[in-house]
Image (cartoon, rainbow, N blue to C red):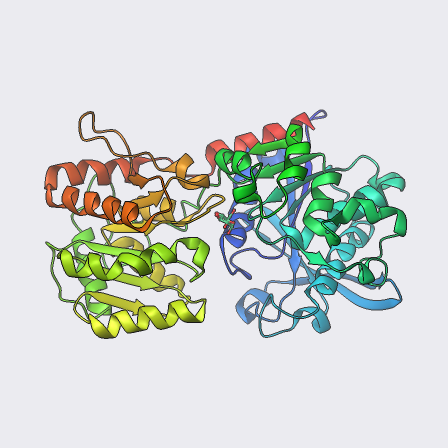
Amino acid sequence: MSENKANKILFVGSEATPFAATGGLGDVLGSLPAALKRERGENIDIRVVIPMYGSISDDDRINFEKVCEFTVNLSWRQQYCGVYKCERNGVIYYFIDNEFYFKRSSMYGSFDDGERYAFFCKAVLEMMPHIGFFPDILHAHDWQSALSVIYLKRKYRYFEEYSHMKAIYTIHNIEYQGIYGFEILSDIFCLDSWDRYIVEYDGCINLTKGAIVCCDRLTTVSPNYANEIQTEYFSHGLHYIIAMNRDKITGIVNGIDYDNYNPEKDTELKRHFSSDNQIQKNVDKAELQNMFSLPERRDVPVIAMISRLASHKGFDLVKRVLEEIVTCDDVQFVLLGTGERDLEDYFSYMANKYPDRVGVKLAFNKTLAKQIYAGADIFLMPSKSEPCGLAQMIASRYGTVPVVRETGGLYDTIKPYNPEDKTGNGITFKTYNAHDMYDAVRRAIELFKNKRQWKTLRTNAMNTDFSWNSSAIKYLEMYDNL
Ligand code: GLC
């Protein structure tokens, strides 16, 4: 292994595909490590650690091997901790086992999430001597792993084996910060009163703030979002802290897993296609229309959304104008997602009212998601904020043209189509306003009618490089510079 480069990296996070995931964070922890490995081969030893959730399938567990067990002291608690591992694409994945904390019906949302992830973070640092791996870089992701950075910098670095370790903290979404009352500072988080100022923010313990202050480098998942979170509108209260630490920030846009998302090979698709041969996409479109009981018509554009049903994904705008869109234009609309109850009710209502135009499935279903990415024409993503966003990239790869709001990573990844010089890979709008979104959708519908222009735009989308390659290199450069 080369001497002056960071060779040993440990990713710490709360989810990773294919083992356990609820969103984009899981995709990143499931695909970025392999991309780093591909880039640097034998010269990097990259490992990932996540909790061993009850939801991890038996098919995955068969490949797990128990590495060790020990006790983690969380204040007065003495908790069992098992460590399991398996290898995937040249990357070792570790799983922190404690059924009391992680064998639950859902990954997040328990009253004691603070304690569960404090245990997880403490276990991560405690496991290092047991597994004989002391990374050069501990790369933590989002608030659930923030304490691993804080523990390293406030406690463990005083021990020799930990003293060389650098910490990177990546913000995937600043909305979720890990905010708690001070009564659990020592009783659960095991922090001393002199650590109080590290985590204190706005009268509470704020774990994200603590990690921002403690880390050596701070990253977010797109350059534009790195700027946005320094402003009040996007920061969910943390702009002062981010701005004070601005020297540490880098924004690196996410990639997607090109092996997993591949319209030329996906087993879930009825027919395969590529940017050079797009014709079979029509068969997948017909299949999609059938699945949603919509009339099988090639001439009508299918607008799709695949999203958690949360208002920051732009659903206020959709609710405001969807009825206008599906009644004024000859279009079909399909939606896949679960989430906030009022949004679920709204879309069910729309599907009942316009059965020939609106198709809705309230579910989280990866196979169906791929069939939608492949079969639709237009992919709508009008987020209020979007740290990076993966769906617009996946849609592009499947030739479904994204219509996005110019925010966060959507701004960095999707450039408006210019019919004059035929550049651009999507359609965009700026202001968070329902009729601005509607206008963008109409522009897409008009372009769809012009077969030649549409093919050019679709080809541009499909040919945009959203693989991890260039971003993996940026991460490696950062590791090396540290
Ligand atoms: C979060 C963000 C999303 C990002 C993903 C992966 O889910 O909301 O924009 O793509 O993390 O970084």
Residue 383 on image: x %, y %: 41, 49
In-image side of 220 versus 277 (left or right): right
Q: Quadrant of residue 481?
A: top right
Is residue 478 depicted above or below 29 in this figure? above
Q: Quadrant of residue 4?
A: top right
In-image side of 214 versus 340 (left or right): right
Residue 361 on image: x %, y %: 33, 69
Q: Quadrant of the N terminus?
A: top right
Residue placed most toward the observer, 39 or 144: 144
Residue 300 on image: x %, y %: 13, 55
Residue under the image location 52 percent in, 43 percent down: 233
Residue under the image location 85 percent in, 47 percent down: 195
Task: Tally the marks.
Answer: 0
Residue under the image location 63 percent in, 73 percent down: 104
Q: Quadrant of the C terminus?
A: top right
Residue 105 on image: x %, y %: 58, 75
Residue 390 can be seen in this image = yes
Residue under the image location 71 percent in, 60 percent down: 117
Q: Quadrant of residue 453?
A: top left
Residue placed most toward the observer, 86 or 191: 191
Residue 262 can be seen in this image = no
